[in-house]
Each structure stands twice: as C-alpha cells, then as structure tokens.
Image: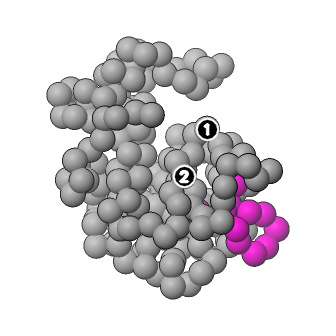
Amino acid sequence: MEQCRVRIGSYSMINNKTEIIVAEDNSHIRASAMEVLLQHGLTPYEAENADEALFVIAAHPNAAILFTDIEMPGGMNGIELAARAHDARPGMGIIVTSGHYCGDRQMQMPEYATFLAKPYQSRQLLDAVDGKIADSKQVRILEEEWGQFPPISKTLPPIDILKRNQWRAGQLH
C-alpha cells in the first residue's frame, strides 16, 4: 500500500472548481456527505440511485469524481455504476463506499476505485477525494510531459509513481 499521503487537514488539491457526484440512497448519509464536500470547497451534485447518477454524470461533463454507495435500489448497484462511469469517462475518479461490503462477496472492487468503509469520518472522505484529485492532476501532468498514455496499459510505470509521490508531497511542480 502506498505510504505517501497528503497531510491531514491540508486538502491541497481541493478547490471550488472540483465537481463531485454523490450517489447514495440514504438521504441522511447523502446530505451529510454533501455538506462536508460543500464546506471544503467542492461542488457536489446528488443522486439517490445509480440510474439517476448516470443522468447527473451526463449533465455535468466536468465532474471529476463519482462517490457512490454499493447497495442502492434500482436496476444497478454502485459497482456497476462505477464500471459504467469509468467506461464513459476513464479519467473520472471513483470512490466506492459501503457498510456491508466485504472482500469475499461476489462483487469485486474495481482496481481503479478507492473503497471507503462506512461509517466514515469527514476526514476520511476528504482524504479519498483529495487522493483522487491528485491522481487526476498527475495523469494530466504526465500526459503533457510524455504525451498520451498508451490505451493498452492503464498502470503507471514505477518512475511515474515516484513522480506522483513527489508531486503529492509538494516537491514537484
């Protein structure tokens, strides 16, 4: 597991231009997540199920992150929503949450997603969001520096991970 983290409380990547979609069927949890995100400079949009989230994603082409619960009513769950969002927008950061998910279930966590167990603290949500924003910005920096990544490989070579860690720590600008 990667040890380089942004200092807690700094949230250096978060700004009011960052749009995030919150897909959560529990209205209290959704409202709480929306409030935390708003208080920390994000622009959140809400959806109460996966089908609605797809419409919100289509309506907000600048949304950088999807934050989704796994178990939601309707035609698809959060894992399926994450896959559809990733297929439509490979650069979108995906954060998946659940209070019931465990590794031995049939649902496999996508490799491009960050898992956040419920109940989570505001700090944990913000750390996950900050990490996804940093990952997204690092990909843009690397694309500018070395050109488009080959579509065959979505993993970064070790030197790129080192640069990302340096960038996250504020050593690379």
- The amino acid type of the residue labelled 1 equals Glu
| Residue labelled with disc 1 | 111
Q: Quadrant of the N terminus?
A: top left
Q: Residue at x 32, y 62 (%)?
A: 123
- The amino acid type of the residue labelled 2 equals Phe
Residue 165 vs 33, above or below: the answer is above
In this orientation, which residue lies closer to the viewer: 121 or 14?
Answer: 121
Residue 134 vs 53, above or below: the answer is above
Separation of residues labelled 1 and 2 (CA atoms): 10 Å
Query: Residue 172, percent across and down?
Result: 21, 26
Specify the label residue 115 is tagged with. Answer: 2
Callout 1 secondary element: loop
Residue 15 vs 154, above or below: the answer is below
Callout 2 secondary element: strand
Give the dominant element type of the magenta stretch: helix, strand or loop. Answer: loop
Instruction: Please state if 123 lies on the left or on the right of 76 as rendered.
Output: left
Q: Residue at x 35, y 68 (%)?
A: 122
Asked if residue 55 shows in the view, the reply is no
